[in-house]
Amino acid sequence: MFVDLHVHLRGTIRPERARLLAVRHNMALPKSMVGVPGYGWHDFASFLQAYDRVTSVVRTARDLEEVAYEYLSIAAEQGTIYVEFMLSPPDLLRAGVPYADQLAAVQAASDRAREQYGIECRLVATAVRHLGPRAAVEAARVAVARATSLVVGFGLTGDERQFPVQQFEEAFRIARSEGLKVTAHAGEHRGAESIIEAVDCLRLDRVGHGVRAAESAPVMRQLAASGIPLEVCLSSNLALGLYPSIKEHPVASLAAAGCTFVLGTDDPTFFATSPQREYQLASIALPLGPTSASITERAIETAFCDEATKARLRLGMYRTARSA
C-alpha cells in the first residue's frame, strides 16, 4: 500500500487527457511534445517550459476534476491509499476559475475516487517561488479564504534558486495563522544549508525534496534530531539529473543518518513514474533499509490530514496485512 505526499496535481496530466483538453479549448500542443514520453523536455529550464505549456490546457473546474480523478483512480488501482495534491490556486484564478470552484472540483474527484476505490485525497495550496514574495502572500490569502477540510497545507514550489527564502515569511505566517501545515521545496537545486534556512525561516512541518542534505553531515544530524520529514521524489531526482542512477541516490545516506523521509511522485507523467514505481525504486536504493510498509506508516504519520483519516488509513493497512 502506497502514499504519495509530494505530487503536483496538474503534473499528473496524461498525454491523452492533455490532447483532449487542448481540443476542448481550441488550443495547440506540438506533436513533438505530446507524442514523446515525458513531453520531450531535456533539462530543468525546458521542463519548466514544458510543464507550463502542457498544464495550460487545464482551463476550467471540469478539467481540473477530470485530471484529479484520473490520477486518483489509476494510483488507487496500483495500491495507493492516500494522496496530497499540490495546486497553486492563483494559476487557475488567472484563467477565470474561482477558488471555490477549484475546491469543488477537487472535492468531487476525491469523493468519487473514495467511493469507488477507497483512496483518500487532500490538497496543499501552493505559491510559486519564482513569481516572487508578493504573489506568495496573495496565494496564502487565497488559500485561507475558505475554510475546508480538503485544504490541509500550504507550500512553496517552483525554482528555489529565485528570491531569498526570508522574503516568504509573511506568506507562511498567514497560512500557519489559519491552522495550515506548511512545506516548501528546498535542497533540490540548492545546497544542504538552504534546507535549514527554509526550515528555520518558514517553520516548516515537512521539506519538499531535501535530498541535498546528504552533502552535509551537520545538516543531516539537525534534520534527524528534529524529525522533520523530507518528501523524497526518486524518479524526479534521476530524471532531472541530480544523480546518475538509483544506486547513487543519497536516500540511503539520509536513512542511515536517521533522517525521516516519505515518498512522492512530483510530476509523475513528466517523470514516467507512479507511487508504486517510487516504492520499487526505494527498495533498490534501500535493500537493508525501511520496508515499504514502514515507509507507508511513516507517511501516514506525517501526512497533513486529520487524525480520524489517519486512523482509517492505518486500519486499512492492518486489515490488508491480516488478509494477506
Image (cartoon, grey):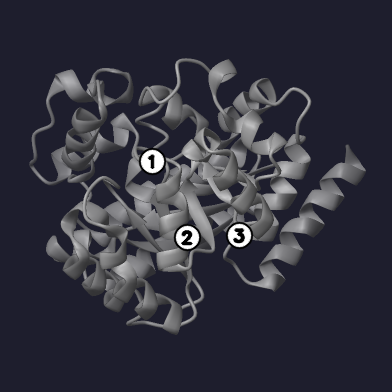
In this rendering, the answer to whether 140 lies above or below 236 is below
Q: Mark 1 or 3 closer to N-term? A: 1
At mark 3, the secondary structure is loop
At mark 1, the secondary structure is helix
Tell me whether circle 1 and circle 3 mark residues in contact (CB < 8 Å).
no
Residue at the location (72% across, 58% down)?
313
Q: Judge whether residue 215 can be spotted in this image.
A: yes
Q: Which residue is mark 3?
A: 303
Question: How far, Cα to Cα, is label 2 from label 1?
Answer: 27 Å
Task: Point out which mark residue 12 bears.
Answer: 1
* Quarter of the rendering containing residue 294: top right
Q: Is residue 10 left or right of residue 293?
A: left
In this rendering, the answer to whether 245 lies above or below 117 is above
In this rendering, the answer to whether 287 lies above or below 52 is above
Q: Percent x, y for residue 217?
A: 59, 39
Residue at the location (26% across, 57% down)?
164
Q: Which residue is mark 2?
A: 199
- Pick the quarter of the image with the N terminus: top right
Q: Judge whether residue 107 can be spotted in this image.
A: no
Q: Is residue 258 left or right of residue 140?
A: right
Question: How far, Cα to Cα, is label 2 from label 3?
Answer: 17 Å
| Crowding at mark 2 (Cα within 10 Å: few <14, some 14-19, many 20+) | many
At mark 2, the secondary structure is helix
Q: Amino acid at mark 3?
A: Ala
Of marks 1 and 3, the one in the foreground? 3
